[in-house]
Image (tube, grey):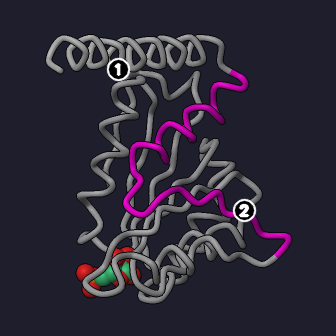
Amino acid sequence: MGFFDFQKEDTMKKVGIVMGSDSDLPVISKVTDQLKALDIPFEVHVYSAHRTPVQARDFALNARTNGFGVIIAAAGMAAHLAGAIAASTTLPVIGIPCKGAVLDGLDALLSTVQMPSGIPVATVAVDGGTNAALLAAQILAVEDAGLAARLDEKRRADAAKVLEKDAAIMERL
Ligand code: RP5
């Protein structure tokens, strides 16, 4: 289990992060880097919908009482983890399909996004760890003005970087 709290445990809901295998860690690192940059507490676990279904379900069933506000679930191949978690909680669940050795992640994308009506999973792009973190942040920011301000500031900074690139390209060509 990984944990990162910035002493915010009492005041802020945590992001629960679950990956189907430790081989998904490169994608999860994008999530944790972005959450750290926004000062958002999180907890990371390796639970599999297929290999450790009891632990995955227990995590989802207890997530709300354990202080989580949103869950990010990442898995590759027959990627049922986000859906299995969503089946056992009404917290918002964000699914990240991970690229595998074959099919370039299309298998995981369809397994994650094609949920039956009634059990939603907000699915980001294949290997889309950064957007998963930002979407989780935006969900928590509905009730957190400070976090909303940090997200606005990031948008401004990102836009400024693009405008710098625009100026540089105009200079060069
Ligand atoms: C999925 O199978 C995992 O999320 C991972 O993306 C993929 C391969 O897992 P390992 O065989 O590397 O453990 O369940």
The quarter of the displayed image where residue 61 is located: bottom right
Residue 108 placement, left or right of 100? right
Residue that numbered label 1 is attached to = 162
> As shown in the figure, which amino acid type bears the numbered disc 2?
Thr
Residue at 55% in and 80% down: 80
Residue 88 percent across, percent down from the top left: 71, 70
- Start and end of the magenta stretch? 117-143
Q: Nearer the viewer, residue 30 or 39?
A: 30
Residue 128 part of the magenta-drawn span: yes
Quarter of the image containing the C terminus?
top left
Residue 67 placement, left or right of 162? right
- Seen in the picture, residue 40 relative to 83 is either above or below; the reply is above
Q: Is mark 1 within 8 Å of ligand 1?
A: no
Residue 69 percent across, percent down from the top left: 64, 42
> As shown in the figure, which amino acid type bears the numbered disc 1?
Val
What crowding class fits label 2: few (fewer than 14 Cα within 10 Å), some (14-19), or many (20 or more)? many
- Seen in the picture, residue 94 relative to 109 is either above or below; the reply is above
Q: Nearer the viewer, residue 50 or 136?
A: 136
Residue that numbered label 2 is attached to = 89
Residue at 29% in and 67% down: 24
Which residue extends farthest left?
172
Residue at 23% in and 58% down: 26
Find residue 78 and name its label.
Answer: none
